[in-house]
Amino acid sequence: MMITRQLKKCFLALIFSLGSIVMFSNVENTEVLTRHEEGGEHHANAASESGLVDSKEEINAYKAHHLADSHDFHLFSYGGEHGSQRHHVGFSLPVIVWTSKGLVVFMSSEFHHNDDGHHIVSKKGIKLAKLHSKIYELEANAHAINFNKEHHPINAHKVLDFSITKSVLGMLIAGLLMLLGFSSLAKGYKRGAIPTGFGRVLEPLVIYVRDEIARPNIGEKKYRKYMGFLLTVFFFIWILNLLGLTPLGFNVTGNIAVTVCLALFTFVITTFTANKDYWKHIFWMPGVPVPMKIVLMPIEILGMFTKPFSLLIRLFANITAGHAVVMGLIAVAYTAREALGVAGGFGVSFLLTLFISLIEVLVAFLQAFIFTMLSSLFIGMAVEEHDHH
C-alpha cells in the first residue's frame, strides 16, 4: 500500500513536470512584454518563427508574466512553424470595472490591438486600455497610453477593477472544492456512519488540525470557537498551493493581495476576540518596573502588526520562490540547447523539475500548516487566561 501511494505521488509530479514544460514551450510570444528605454515605451517582442520562448530576455519576461495575474486564461498554443499562423487555445474571463461612466462589464476577448500595439476596447463612449494586466481609462481623444519619463501614464487613469481574473477563478474553484468536500464529510457524520468518498480523505486532516494545531495552541476550552476559521484557512491555502503546481498556471497564494487578506483575517480575529489580560500585557506589562513598562509598550504595539506581516510575507515569498525556481529549471531546456543539445537540455530540465515538483508538493502542505499553526498561536496568545499571584 505504501509503495502504491509513493508511485501515485511520483506519477502526479511527473504529470506536473511534463505539463509545465509543455505550457512553457507553447506560450505566445506576443504576450511577453519587455521594457525598452526609448522614450519610456513598452514594446512587444516579435514572435519567433517557431513560436517558442527561447531567449534569455523572453524567458525572464515569461516568468514575470506567469507569476502575474491575468484577465484571460491561456491553456496552450500550437502551429506557427514555417511561417504558418499560430493558434492559441484558452478562454476569456469577465472584465468588471467601475469607470467615470459607471459600471462596465464585458469579456476580456474584446480587447484588441490598435495600430500602436495597445489593447483597447470602447464601451459607453469611453476607451479602456489594458497594459501589464492593469486596466486604464483613456482621456478624451486619446488612442493609446502615453507615459512620462518616470513611466507614469499622463493621459489615462486606473479604474476600479472587480474582474474575475485567473486568481479569482482559482479561489472560486478552491471554494467550490471545499464546499463539495466538506458537504460530503458533513453528510457522512449526519448519517452516523463512516464518511465515504472524498470526505474520508478530509476526516484525518480535520482531526489533525483539531488535535495538533487548535487544541495545543488555543486551549481545550476555547478551541472550538476558532475551528471553522482554522480549517478554512488550512484547506484554502493547501488547495490553492496544489492548483499552483498544475500546468493551469494558477499562482494565487503567490499574489501578495491574497496573502494580505488572509493575514488581515487573522489580525482582526486576534484583535477583536482578545481578553483584557492580552491588552494589559501590551499596554502596561504586569510584574515589571514602571520605566520598563513604558519602554515595552511601543514594542508590544509594534508586535501586533509584525505578526500578520510575517504571515503574509512568509506565504507569499515561499510560493513565489517555488514557482520562479520551477520556471527557471524548465528554462534550462532552452538555454542549454547549444551546450547539451535538445535531448540533453530537456533531460536535465526534466529531472530537475521533477525533483523540485516533488518538493513543492510537500511545500504546498507545509505552508498551509505553518500559516494555520501561527494563526492559532496568535489567537491562543490573545485568549489565554493569566493567573497573577
Image (cartoon, rainbow, N blue to C red):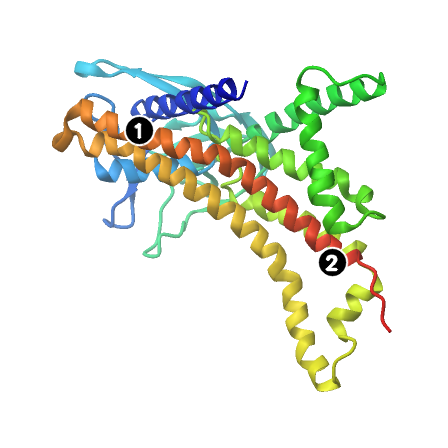
Determine the residue positioned at 73% across, 44% down. 214
Coordinates of residue 311 in the picture (x, y in percent): 58, 51
Q: Is residue 107 above or below residue 78?
A: below
Determine the residue positioned at 60% across, 25% down. 173
Q: Is residue 157 above or below residue 305?
A: above
Determine the residue positioned at 18% across, 33% down. 336
Q: Quadrant of the C terminus?
A: bottom right
Coordinates of residue 357 in the picture (x, y in percent): 41, 31
Q: Residue tagged by mark 1?
A: 351
- Tell me whether the residue at label 1 lies in contact with that at label 2, contact meaning CB atoms closer than 8 angstroms: no
Q: N-terminal of the two: label 1 or label 2?
A: 1
332 lies left or right of 235: left
Pick whichever, 107 or 92, lies toward us.
92
Q: Is residue 143 visible?
A: no
52 lies left or right of 82: right
Pick whichever, 286 or 134, lies toward us.
286
Q: Residue tagged by mark 2?
A: 381
341 lies left or right of 175: left
